[in-house]
Image (cartoon, rainbow, N blue to C red):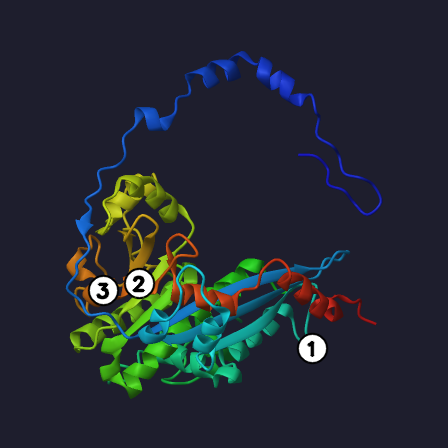
Amino acid sequence: MPYPAGNRLPGERASRLGHLEVLKSELVNRLCKSFENPESVSELPNVAWEAIPSIGVPLKIVFGVDGSMQSIRSETQPYKELAFVKTAILKIDSAALARVDRENPCPFALRDIMTDSASHHATVFPLKNVGISGTSTYHAIRQIIFDSINDQSLEGEPLETLKWIAYKKWDTQPKQLDYFGCPHCEETVATLPYDAEEGSCPSCGNHLLLTDMLGFHLEMAEDSAPSSLAMSYMSVHETLLIFTAIRYFWQERREALARCLFVKDGPLYLRAQYSKLVNPIRKFLAHAKESGHPVHLIGQEKTGKFHEHLQMIGRDAPVGYLFIPDAHYISREINHSPDSKTPYGKDTNYGVKVFVKLNEYHQMVLNIPTTKNVTNPYVESPKLEDLIGFEKIFATLPELLSYRHEGGLLPIELANGVASLSTYPSAQILKMFAEESFRPST
């Protein structure tokens, strides 16, 4: 690797003739001649496509959730870095969507839909060489996460939703918080009494916040944090936003859940330590279905290996069909790895992958929750009948299609319009806003 440019001297340039020795290599030439085009020697995997059911009634109320993150770095040493996060949720009804031109939507029609129907949240994290007086970056970010989830512009509802999930408040028997690693002494003995937002570690006595149970502190050092922390926060907050809407209907208008569809941009997935929310989410979804009030929830993956796999197998797929890969297919054909002792997604996903081809312009990777029962909600080899609310979900999808993008869904498109932080001009504006933090302290 060449030396990078510094403040005083230029960077090292790679040799422009170095490739000649590679091209002369006998081994390189022999190997290149032996390579073949995989498409000419291998067949596509055997995919069990099945017809999309046409027996459901479309859902009338649709919620969309999306998020965006943008990190800003100073141009001089010591490099300072901030990360801005924005998430948004919007509510639309099918009657309003029906009036939108799917190919060239009128800005005024979109404005009318968005009026009083969208809410957003924004926060910022000091990642490197930016601090808060009197505390370390580590503890400053802990407090920022708690305050952000308790954002009063959203009336603190995401924090209430976190409590609702973490304490399993749909259950009639109150329980303390599951044990988690203390951010101070690192002992896995930290907990909080039922419905508490703050407390003390029973081992070291230091102050605990409810958001500590999520484990953000495990991504941080004492004086810095990676940008992945901001991405993790965005993913968690998106999940809390979508379940804030679900919680409202569950507590206030439970019978209306039968008319709602909740759409999230991205997979129904929480990685690593944040996956501790997955099991209670699964149990709630199973409980809601068994109670006769199933939650209609989907996520859409627009990029990544599953999206790429669909581009390959979708070319020859029949229109109006779907395919639900099991853990074995995902390991063999998508991850290209041996079957794991822990099936794919068992600890991290609260929805299974569903490849859908509605027409030649709309094939998509959806995530839809499944369940067998409350005791064991994980389904290793899902079938169509395991998908919660599949009849109404697939009846609603044709009414949500956008023709501005291949595989586009209007709820996600509109939510992205609210939550998006583009590289330009958003990043430039945020950088100007952050300049005060980048100035040397006096």
Choose the circle earlier in sequence order: 2 or 3: 2
The answer to whether the residues at label 2 and label 3 have Cβ atoms under 8 Å apart is: no
Choose the circle earlier in sequence order: 1 or 2: 1
Q: Amino acid at mark 2?
A: Tyr
Q: Position of residue 238 (x, y in %)?
A: 43, 69
Q: Find the distance from the CA under tag 1 to the CA under tag 2.
A: 40 Å
Relative vertical location of residue 442 with respect to residue 312 in this rendering, above or below: below
Relative vertical location of residue 252 with respect to residue 89 in this rendering, above or below: below
Q: Position of residue 124 (x, y in %)?
A: 60, 70
Picture quarter with the C terminus: bottom right
> Which residue in the structure is indicated by mark 3?
395
The answer to whether the residues at label 3 and label 1 have Cβ atoms under 8 Å apart is: no
Mark 3 residue crowding within 10 angstroms, few (<14) / some (14–19) / many (20+): some
Question: In the rendered image, is residue 212 in sight?
Answer: no
On screen, residue 297 versus residue 289, left or right, reads right
Q: Residue at x 33, y 66 (%)?
A: 278
Q: Residue at x 51, y 14 (%)?
A: 29
Question: In the rendered image, is residue 242 in sight?
Answer: yes
Secondary structure at numbered mark 3: helix
Q: Position of residue 154 (x, y in %)?
A: 48, 82
Relative vertical location of residue 394 with respect to residue 360 in this rendering, above or below: below
Q: Position of residue 266 (x, y in %)?
A: 40, 59
Mark 1 residue crowding within 10 angstroms, few (<14) / some (14–19) / many (20+): few
Secondary structure at numbered mark 1: loop
On screen, residue 90 versus residue 441, left or right, reads left
- In the displayed orientation, state which residue is furthest to the bottom: 252
Question: Front-most of 278 and 289?
Answer: 289
Question: Front-most of 442 and 205?
Answer: 442
- Using the image, tell me which numbered label, if any, was put on residue 350: 2
> Which residue in the structure is indicated by mark 1?
134
Q: Find the distance from the CA under tag 2 to the CA under tag 3.
A: 22 Å
Choose the circle earlier in sequence order: 3 or 1: 1
